[in-house]
């Protein structure tokens, strides 16, 4: 069964360093998302991406964050200068159509980012 | 604005008990979609069900059932004859058309099923 794949599963980085979280969405999906879950809290929307551009972003997704689909299969989230409060589980998701329009979003297993 | 409330933070039951997880949503849209996701201890988010606002028919899938009531803006999830493997965090989520497909999640309910 097709699945969303995220790498790495766990990343530890020093404050101020840049990190890139990688995702391979399901191959025929057209919409891509990043969500964040701080430990013990709810899952929060960061950004949605369609047709090679950001379609919506949340307040959390400030200038330190960027997304890219560099090669038609990977979907990346970059944090330029990490802060302690960026420590969280980051989930990538993809859907064939807009979530809810006859389809659902499938999530990857997550990347746990720890900023020290 | 849209909002999802899961008032139950933690629920603990003994195996074989039935348990209901509550979800209340807020939206002014007449068309919207509701979801339940399961997050087991391993951390991934597993899709369970999607419901659109025009379909109030309750759904049953094995030991799982969902009760959607527009009159009370609720989309509750019942597990019948719970099992230890049901132990997880369960999230209810809402999506509306035109907002690029983002999901608005509730706080989650941690379900612990004891043997």
Image (cartoon, grey):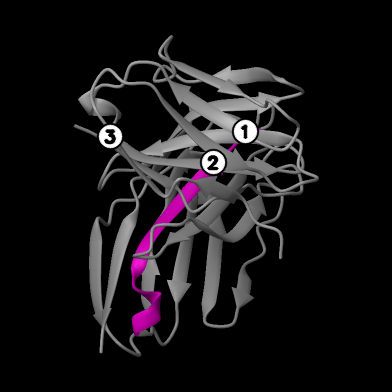
* Residue B63 is inside the magenta segment: no
Position of B106 with respect to A116 (left or right) is right
Tag 1 secondary structure: strand
Reply above or below: A78 against B110.
Answer: above
Q: Is residue A80 visible?
A: yes
Mark 2: which secondary structure? strand
Chain letter for the residue marked with disc 1 in the picture? A
Residue A92 is labelled as 2
Marks 1 and 2 in Cβ contact (< 8 Å): yes
Q: Main secondary structure of the magenta part?
A: strand
The image position of residue A5, as x and y in percent, is 58, 50
| B57, B93: nearer the viewer | B93
* Residue count near mark 1 (Cα–Cα under 10 Å), binned few <14, some 14–19, many ≥20: many
Q: CA distance from mark 3 to mark 2?
A: 16 Å
- The residue that mark 3 highlights is A87
Q: Chain of mark 3?
A: A
Is residue B30 toward the left or the right of residue A15 in the image? Answer: right
Q: Residues within 10 Å of mark 2 (few under 14, many from 20)?
A: many
- Residue, x 76% and y 46% (percent of image)? A27
- Rendered position, B112 above or below A16: below
Residue B70 in sight in this render: no
N-terminal label among 1 and 2: 1
Magenta residues?
B84-96
Count residues near mark 3 (Cα–Cα under 10 Å), then give few for <14, some for 14-19, many for 20+: many
Q: Position of residue A101 (x, y in %)?
A: 74, 42
Of B92 and A27, the residue lying toward us: A27
Q: CA distance from mark 1 to mark 2?
A: 8 Å
């Amino acid at each position: 069964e097709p699945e969303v794949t995220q790498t790495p599963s766990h990343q530890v980085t020093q404050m101020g360093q840049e990190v890139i979280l990688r995702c391979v969405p399901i191959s025929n999906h057209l919409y891509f998302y990043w969500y964040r879950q701080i430990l013990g809290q709810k899952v929060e929307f960061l950004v949605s991406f369609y047709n090679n551009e950001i379609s919506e972003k949340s307040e959390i997704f400030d200038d330190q964050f960027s997304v890219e689909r560099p090669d038609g299969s990977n979907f990346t989230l970059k944090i330029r200068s990490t802060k302690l409060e960026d420590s969280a589980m980051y989930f990538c998701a993809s859907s064939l159509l807009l979530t809810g329009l006859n389809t659902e979003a499938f999530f990857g297993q997550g990347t746990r980012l720890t900023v020290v | 604005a849209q909002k999802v409330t899961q008032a139950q933070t933690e629920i603990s039951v003994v195996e074989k008990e039935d348990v209901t997880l509550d979800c209340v949503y807020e939206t002014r849209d007449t068309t919207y979609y509701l979801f339940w996701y399961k997050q087991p201890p391993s951390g991934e988010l597993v899709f369970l069900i999607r419901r659109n606002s025009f379909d109030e028919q309750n759904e049953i899938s094995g030991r799982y059932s969902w009760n959607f009531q527009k009159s009370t803006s609720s989309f509750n999830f019942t597990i019948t004859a719970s099992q230890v493997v049901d132990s997880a965090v369960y999230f209810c989520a809402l999506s509306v058309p035109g907002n690029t497909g983002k999901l608005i999640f509730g706080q989650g309910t941690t379900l612990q099923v004891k043997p």
